[in-house]
Amino acid sequence: MGEHLLTVCYLIGSVAFILGLKMLSHPAAARKGNLVAAFGMVVAIAGTIFLYRDGETGQRLHNYTWIFSGLLIGGVVGILSAKKVKMTSMPEMVSLFNGMGGACAALISLVEFNHLSKELGEGTVKVASIQPTVLIIALGLIIGSVSFAGSLIAWGKLNGKVKDYSFTGQNILNLIFLAIALCAAVYLVIDPAQHFLLYIILLLSLLYGVLFVMPIGGADMPVVISLLNSFTGVAAACGGFLYDNKVMLTGGILVGAAGTLLTILMCKAMNRSLTNVLVGSFGGSNKSGVSIETKSQGVYKEISITDAAMVMNYANKVLIVPGYGLAVAQAQHICHELEKILEEKGVEVKYAIHPVAGRMPGHMNVLLAEADVNYEKLLEMEVANDEFKTTDVVLILGANDVVNPAAKNDPTSPIFGMPILEVENAKTVIVNKRSMKPGYAGIENDLFFQPKTAMLFGDAKKVLQNLCAEIKAV
């Protein structure tokens, strides 16, 4: 009876994961989808704790003190971290949590191999019978360790604690480490009695994870996070194979597939191959020794709050382009207020969203949804580019690289070929930035020096507050 109930729990968990993932595809249903998936996880965990029986011995789980201590500590840490995190810090939290998933998968491999080693030493199992299991263990250890180490480095890069680092021949060294780890894994599968190989694989995988992410530039972090997320899913699926746990296998496959598809979509949005992302170091350290910031572009012009308010007040259509500067200033709510004020004056207002704006995929969508911006007003890049031609004013709030015309016009630019928001086609472009410093990719923006562009310097929240006040007074 208990076995059948456990199967039902796993079925509920699997269905909840699939439905939750489907609901996450739309901001209006995303919160509910998250709760549905969480409910499925609770059912699966409770079923495992109270209904699971070992297939051979029939023994239930008995180490409840360790189980519930782990659940309590992890739950408290997770809740407090999620409550305290700012939207601007969400990408690094995603990366950190993803790394914990990879670490969990690696630890499962270590624990299960020690169990197998003990049985092998006692002579209760034969080498041939455990080789498929050892293969899954080795794969889970490699993928989980790479995900853990890589995610920690990505977390450090996103919060500024880790700098880009590379050296000549680093990619070759990375491949050597990975090749040795894979060869050691093959040998371990052939001869599981060679216990020391497991720890060599662990060490090499961790080193590879660190060196794999270290040279990748900041502008490529959204792609890297998606890729590492898929690694964690595959590693979790390996754990599902080890335990013959259907819900763990389903969850791992869903995460792995979703992360892989998202990685492909991000590469497509940047018009780059995954190989180019992993090797190109776009947005990383400038190896040429020439300061990009000193590139001579000409003279930019500034616009006052009063003039900007006047231009926007008498416009027929305004498109707002949100970027990381908006997130840093926590200005999404006052941005929505500006939208409502303009609409009351008969101005059509929409938002142009680039797929990789911010620090992770969907960052801007989530940020604006938090401020109750109507999802129908968020235009995807292709649609927005058609709208710019009939737009009177574009207001850019902290976006930089995703509106840089060099991606289309300058073959020597590192971002050449990346699809951008073609804001230069609008009649007037107002750019809000704190300063003229380059964006996340570390390159100058040609847009700022074009005749129809005007710079509006200052913190996005303060600038928007002033704009709202001025437009109301007009």
Image: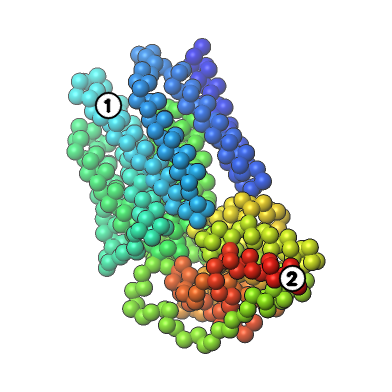
Cα–Cα span, label 2 and label 1: 74 Å
Q: Residue 473 bears which disc, if any?
A: 2
| Residue 256 visible to an observer of this rendering | no
Could you say whether the residue bearing mark 1 is in a helix, strand or loop?
Answer: helix
Identify the residue at horizontal 42%, vertical 78% (top origin): 292
Q: Residue 130 bears which disc, if any?
A: none
Amino acid on which the number 1 mark rests in the picture:
His
- Which numbered disc flags the more N-terminal residue, 2 or 1? 1
Of 31 and 269, nearer the camera is 31
Residue 375 lies, with reference to residue 279, above or below; the image says above
Residue 142 lies, with reference to residue 424, above or below; the image says above
Q: Which residue is disc 1 drawn over?
A: 115
Quarter residue 238 falls in: top left
| Residue 247 visible to an observer of this rendering | yes
**Image x and y of residue 221, in percent:** 44, 58
Q: Is residue 42 left or right of residue 57?
A: right
Quarter residue 220 falls in: bottom left
Of 244 and 470, nearer the camera is 470
Could you say whether the residue bearing mark 2 is in a helix, strand or loop?
Answer: helix
**Image x and y of residue 195, in percent:** 20, 35
Q: Is residue 202 left or right of residue 394?
A: left
**Image x and y of residue 398, in percent:** 55, 67
Identify the residue at horizontal 54%, vertical 87% (top origin): 299
Q: Marks 1 and 2: in contact by CB < 8 Å?
A: no
Amino acid on which the number 2 mark rests in the picture:
Ala
Identify the residue at horizontal 64%, vertical 61% (top origin): 335
> Comparing marks 2 and 1, which lies closer to the viewer?
2
Q: Is residue 256 left or right of residue 20?
A: left
Q: In which quarter of the image is the C terminus?
A: bottom right
Quarter residue 319 falls in: bottom right
Identify the residue at horizontal 45%, vertical 49% (top origin): 93
**Image x and y of residue 327, in percent:** 54, 59
